[in-house]
Amino acid sequence: MTRGQRRLSAVATAAIVVGLSAACGGTNTNAPAGEGTASAPASQGAGGELAGQVKVDGSSTVGPLTSAASEFFSEEQPKVNVSVSTSGTGGGFEKFCNGETDISNASRPIKDEEKAACEAKGIKYTELTVATDALTVVVNKENTWATCLTTDQLKKMWEPAAEGKINSWKDVDPKFPDEPLKLFGAGTDSGTFDYFTDEINGEEGASRKDYSPSEDDNVTVQGVEGSKGGLGYFGFTYFEENAAKLKAVQIDSGKGCVTPSAETAQNGTYTPLARPLFVYPSSAAAKRPEVAAFLEYYVANVNKIATDAKFIPLNPEQETKLKTDLATLKSQAG
């Protein structure tokens, strides 16, 4: 199955499938604090076969990775339904901390206000790093001038002060043509938006508003593809999937132009747009056998899953830490 087929399959799966209990954030107002009840308890049949539901939501960047994990897992546990929705990192945490989901996908760490929201509902969780991403800036195939952009040039395009003023590529650099600059990017509920604005504009959430935002990366793909002066950004996986339609821009943060890739993200040369990707399971959810089994499978096969789904695998140190963090979660759940 191709990466694109897996993404489509994930959508179909989400329509059919499920919602893992409140564990990952699903608390019931009638239940003791910290005890999720989003889904019915799992049953366990002969031979260790499990049945139940696991509900995941959050980052559109991480979603395809977790969807790939769920598809592989379903081959071993076909009666466990894992649904993966993509309302953005912020939207996912809102549902997670409101007791509506079991696991939250995130392309940035959980924020203090989100931690407080989870704490208010008694929802405990563990942060698990499952892959690495190279946030990728893309331009139209007809763009022959922006093969490499400095972080200063990106800031000049995207900072709040650019609104209504930086409207042409020539405004960014006099050497560029007088081609209308059409910007497409992540919506404000996206962890990608938070990360990009923090690293490029120097403040999380600080961005010009006169661009085309969307929580759906496919909208960004279509926008940039349809505009000669278009520019957008999203996760490396989405670029790989759409490499025939778009061009990736090299980034110069002061040490020369670097191409986004698995190698440059892992070795630290692709700065500042290489980033970790996370899943956040709740401690309550991890007590349920079907959730525990899914998490154990995910972690045990994380790099195989990442490679198959065209994500950037963890390095050995990251993989060791992931296994340690899962062990910590299991001890809390136990």
Image: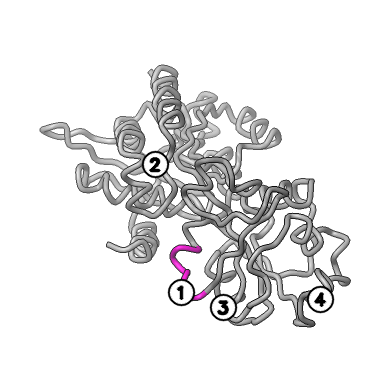
Q: State the count of labels.
A: 4
Q: Name the foreground residue: 298 vs 36.
A: 298
Please say whether residue 311 is visible from this viewpoint.
yes
Q: Name the foreground residue: 167 vs 325.
A: 167
Label 2 packing within 10 angstroms: few (<14), some (14-19), many (20+): many
* Mark 4 lies on residue: 170
- In the image, taking residue 179 as reference, residue 51 lies left or right, namely left
- The type of residue carrying mark 4 is Lys
Q: Quadrant of the C terminus?
A: top left
- The type of residue carrying mark 3 is Lys
Label 3 packing within 10 angstroms: few (<14), some (14-19), many (20+): some
Q: Quadrant of the N terminus?
A: bottom left
CA distance for labels 3 and 2: 42 Å
- The type of residue carrying mark 1 is Ala
Tag 3 and tag 2, C-beta contact below 8 Å: no
Q: Is residue 62 above or below residue 221?
A: above
First in residue order: circle 3 vs circle 4: 3
First in residue order: circle 1 vs circle 3: 3
* Mark 2 lies on residue: 20
Residue at 29% across, 51% down: 71
User: In the rendering, which numbered label is found on residue 141?
Assistant: 3
- Judged from this view, the residue extending furthest toward the front is 256
Mark 4 vs mark 1: in front: 4
Tag 1 and tag 3, C-beta contact below 8 Å: no
The magenta region covers 239-245
- x and y percentages locating residue 52 in the rendered image: 29, 41
Q: Secondary structure at mark 1?
A: loop
Mark 2 vs mark 4: in front: 4
